[in-house]
Image (spheres, grey):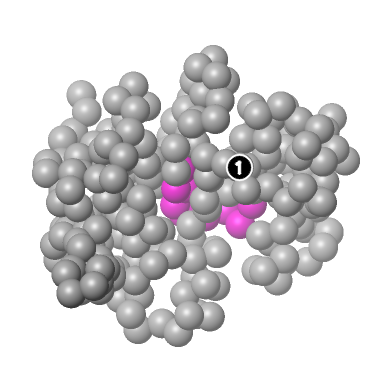
């Protein structure tokens, strides 16, 4: 199976006065279509930097990043934003929902940028919210929901454009263990349906859901292990 994302000798370097800080140091990584991959490491290990580059939210200082075989350096920022919006769905630890929008409007929003007709946007958003048990909350604002409900809205929004890749950044970090387990089981189901799932976490119990664990420390990928 071909790689959906590939990093070749990728470094992210920041200048601190006269010195250089390597947030990421010569990282090589292949993620195949349909894999469930965990990027695992302690705070300050470089996993967030790796996530931003894997998610095409940032570009490397050195090296190359390929998304579906295409070098992201060849795209303009607007082209990359369009491709990213269609190909990658993001689930953030802090939910990142718009407080002034309803649940339904939050899920519909990514589809606006993909020029999907209004009727289709609404229909798809309603189906996604129904699938996570929130069809009775469509007109509520995020502040009227529990943390678990907000995260389910965030998962629905991440799937709004039917992306090939779902990228979760500590998606259970603000949830209790029972709710967090439900979110992880949901990601596992999404993966079984053929989506590539990439999870960024410092929690070993969450990493155990993945087929492959990428261990990162001090900006370097130390090892890549397959889960049995």
Which residue is rendered at x = 72% and y = 37% of the image? 129
- Give left or right: position of 46 versus 89: left
User: Which residue in the rendered view is the most extreme toward the right?
Assistant: 139
**x and y, in percent, of residue 83 in the image:** 49, 70
Q: How many marks?
A: 1
Is the residue 1 above or below the residue 223 in the image?
A: below
Q: Splitting the image into 4 quarters, where does residue 120 fall?
A: bottom right
- Give left or right: position of 72 versus 179: left
Which residue is rendered at x = 78% and y = 66% of the image? 117
**x and y, in percent, of residue 147 in the image:** 65, 29
Label 1 packing within 10 angstroms: few (<14), some (14-19), many (20+): many
The answer to whether residue 201 is visible is yes
Viewer-proximal residue among 71 and 205: 205
Which residue is rendered at x = 18% and y = 33% of the image? 226
Q: Splitting the image into 4 quarters, where does residue 62 fall?
A: bottom left
Viewer-proximal residue among 84 and 2: 84
Is the residue 88 above or below the residue 151 in the image?
A: below
The magenta span reads 160-168
Q: Please, what secondary structure does the residue beneath circle 1 have?
A: loop
From the image, tell me which residue sits under label 1.
Answer: 95
């Amino acid at each position: 199976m071909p790689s959906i994302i590939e990093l070749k000798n990728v470094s992210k370097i920041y200048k601190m006065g006269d010195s250089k800080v390597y947030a990421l140091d010569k990282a090589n990584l292949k993620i195949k279509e349909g894999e469930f991959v965990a990027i695992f490491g302690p705070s300050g290990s470089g996993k967030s930097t790796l996530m931003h580059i894997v998610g095409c939210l940032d570009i490397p200082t050195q090296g190359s990043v390929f998304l579906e075989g295409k070098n992201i350096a060849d795209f303009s920022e607007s082209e990359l934003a369009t491709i990213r919006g269609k190909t990658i769905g993001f689930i953030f630890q802090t939910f990142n929902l718009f407080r002034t929008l309803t649940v339904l409007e939050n899920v519909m929003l990514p589809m606006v940028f993909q020029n999907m007709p209004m009727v289709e946007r609404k229909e798809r958003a309603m189906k996604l919210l129904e699938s996570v048990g929130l069809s009775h909350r469509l007109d509520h604002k995020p502040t009227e929901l529990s943390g678990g409900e907000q995260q389910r809205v965030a998962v629905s929004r991440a799937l709004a454009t039917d992306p090939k890749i779902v990228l979760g950044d500590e998606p259970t970090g603000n949830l209790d263990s029972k709710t967090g387990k439900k979110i992880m089981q949901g990601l596992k189901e999404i993966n079984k349906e053929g989506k590539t799932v990439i999870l960024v976490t410092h929690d070993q119990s969450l990493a155990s859901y993945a087929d492959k664990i990428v261990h990162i420390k001090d900006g370097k990928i130390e090892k890549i292990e397959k889960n049995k």
